[in-house]
Amino acid sequence: MKIAVFASHNGSDLQAIIDACQNGMLNATVEAVISNNSDSKALERAHKANISSYHISAKTCGNESNTDAPILYILQKHQIDLVFLAGYLKKIGDQTLRQYHNRIFNIHPALLPKYGGKGMYGMQVHAAVIHAGESTSGVTIHRVNEEYDAGEIVAQKMIPVSKSDTPESLAKKVLQYEHLFLVDFLKDIVNGSIPLG
């Protein structure tokens, strides 16, 4: 299975996918990495792994709405089967959503439908969970549609929140589970347990 990963910043989830493909845990290949941030570590990680990488953003395309066609072109050029958003902070355009209907997945560091939507990413999510006094948080993987974090929830992993947790400590705890969880999820896609399309 050919995977494209979209990431905006550090790309630790991307690295987990690359490692799983390289060590045989995942019968797939990362064929392309796309980032809206030319300085993202995700692009560096792709370069180190000899994976085709692309910076596509309003800067490179004139405005945000012009990014859809080049993104779709890259996915088709690499014959991508599945798109995985790993900390990608931009909406996916309508053309790409149509062509890859039910084949685009996003990972979110909380138990959706709580703590999702526009602006809810990274430390903001963990701060909101702590502020609300939640006893559990977790990781959600969902299909991507036109709204932020609103697509069908496909998999979730619950993680306990302790009274001493800060947003920073919760972020570390969630990330520790996130990498294993997303690889297991992708295995289920590859072996057909979770259907595409």
Image (cartoon, rainbow, N blue to C red):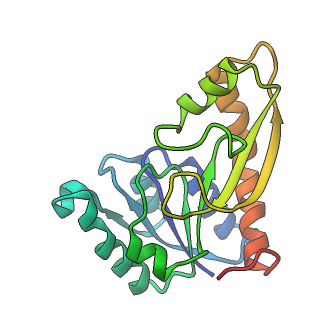
Image position of 186 with respect to 182: above or below = below
Q: Position of residue 150 (x, y in %)?
A: 59, 55
State the residue at coordinates (73%, 71%): 24
* 9 sits to left or right of 104: left
Image position of 192 with respect to 136: above or below = below
* Residue 132 picture quarter: top right
The residue furthest left is 62
* Residue 35 picture quarter: bottom left
Give the quarter of the figure containing the N terminus: bottom right
State the residue at coordinates (73%, 78%): 190
* 130 sits to left or right of 117: right
State the residue at coordinates (67%, 31%): 172
Q: Nearer the viewer, residue 113 or 138?
A: 113
State the residue at coordinates (76%, 53%): 181
Q: Position of residue 144 (x, y in %)?
A: 56, 63
* 59 sits to left or right of 23: left
Q: Nearer the viewer, residue 115 or 180?
A: 115
The residue furthest top is 164
Q: Position of residue 73 (x, y in %)?
A: 34, 81
Q: How many marks?
A: 0
Q: Position of residue 118 (x, y in %)?
A: 47, 43
Image position of 128 with respect to 156: above or below = above
Give the quarter of the figure containing the C terminus: bottom right
